[in-house]
Amino acid sequence: MLNKLSLLVLAMVLSLNIMAQDAKDKITLVIHGGAGTILKKNMTPEKEKAYREKLTEALETGYKILEDGGTSLEAVVATINVMENSPLFNAGKGAVFANNGKNELDASIMDGKTLNAGAVAGVTVIKNPINAALEVMNNSEHVLLTREGAEEFAKKQNLEIVDPSYFYTERRKQSLEKAKANEENRGQIPYSDLLNNKHGTVGCVALDQFGNLAAGTSTGGMTNKKFARVGDSPIIGAGTYANNKTCAVSSTGHGEFFMRNLVAYDVSAMMEYKGMSLEDASNKVIMDKLTELGGTGGIICVDHEGNVSMPFNTAGMYRGYIKADGSKKVLIYKDEE
Ligand code: ASP
C-alpha cells in the first residue's frame, strides 16, 4: 500500500518536473522599437550600430529576467525601460513633440493570466510611463488614467518624476518644426511623411516559465499631434493585448488605424474563435485587414507555445527576439531574416 502511494507521489513529482522544464523550454521575449520608412540608404553605419546595440541590450535585459525565473510582466517593464531611457526611440527620453511643443507620453501593459491591464495617456513628467501603467494595473481600480490625474497618481506611487525638459532632444524638436512648416505650406501633412521622422514607439511581449504571457507598449505618439490626441498605444485591444489562451501583442504605426481595427485584440480573437495559428492570424490582421484600410505599421506577437510573429507593412521595423532554444535576432529592414 505504502509502496503504491510512494510510487504515485514519485510519478506526480516527475511529471510536475517535466511540465516545469517544458515551460522553461518555451520562455520567449520579443521587442519592437517602431515601424516606418526605415531605409538602409538613409542610415549611417554608426546610427545602425547604435540601434542594434540598444535593441540587443533591451532584449538581453528582459530575457535574463525570464531565465532567472522572473515573470513576463517584470521582463516587459524592464525591457521597455531600457528603450524609454534611450534617446533613440519615440518613448520616454527622445519622444516626439506634440503641436504645443510638449512631449505627451502614452503607455499600456496587460497581464495575459488575469486579463488585468493598466495605461496612462498624455503624461509629461513621468520618467517611465510603462511603470505608471503597471501601477495603474496593480494599485488602482481603473484601467486608463490621463494627463494631470495620471501624474498625481504616479507621484503617490513614488514613481520617478522629471522636469519636462528631460524628454527634450534636438532631433525631435526639429521634426516638429519641419512638420509645422510643411503643414503651413501644403495643408495637412501625409502620415507617410511623418513616419519618416517619428518612428520609434517601443513594445515588448513575453512568455515566462510559468506559462504566462504579457504585453506592453510605450510612446510619444505622433509628431505635431494636436488637441490632446491619444493614439492606440495606451488603448487595450488596439496597441496592447495579452491573453494566456492565445497570444500577447504590441503594436506600432498609424494609431488611428490600429484603434479602428482593434489590431492587437483582433489577432487574439482570430486565434480564439477561428482556431488560426499565430502566424496566420497576425499576417491576416496586418498584411490584409490593416493594409486594405490604408493603415501602416506592424506588430510583435508571441503565443502560449513560444511561437513568434512580427509582421509589418512599412519599409522597416526595429525588432528582435530571444527564444529558449538560443535563437536570437535583431532586425531593422524588410528583407532581413
Ligand atoms: N502608434 C503610435 C501612435 O499612433 C505611433 C507609432 O507607433 O509610431 O501614437
Image (spheres, rainbow, N blue to C red):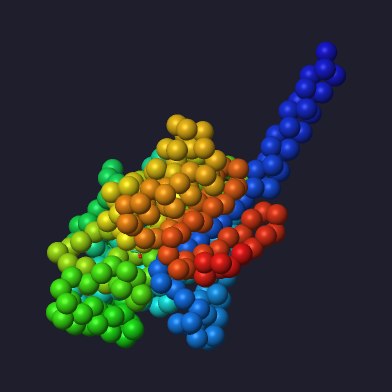
Q: Position of residue 278 (x, y in %)?
A: 53, 44
Say whether residue 183 is visible.
yes
Say whether residue 135 is visible.
no
Farthest residue in the right direction? 3
* Screen quadrant of the C terminus: bottom right
Q: Quadrant of ligand 1?
A: bottom left
Farthest residue in the front direction? 292
Q: Position of residue 239 (x, y in %)?
A: 36, 53
- Name the foreground residue: 177 vs 159: 177
- Name the foreground residue: 285 vs 292: 292
Q: Is residue 57 left or right of residue 128?
A: right
Q: Position of residue 200 (x, y in %)?
A: 40, 70
Q: Where is 66 relative to 50, above or below?
A: above
Residue drawn where x is 54% and y is 47% of the image: 279
Residue drawn where x is 47% and y is 76% of the image: 39
Q: Position of residue 217 (x, y in %)?
A: 40, 58
Farthest residue in the top direction? 1
Q: To which quarter of the image does residue 9 belong?
A: top right
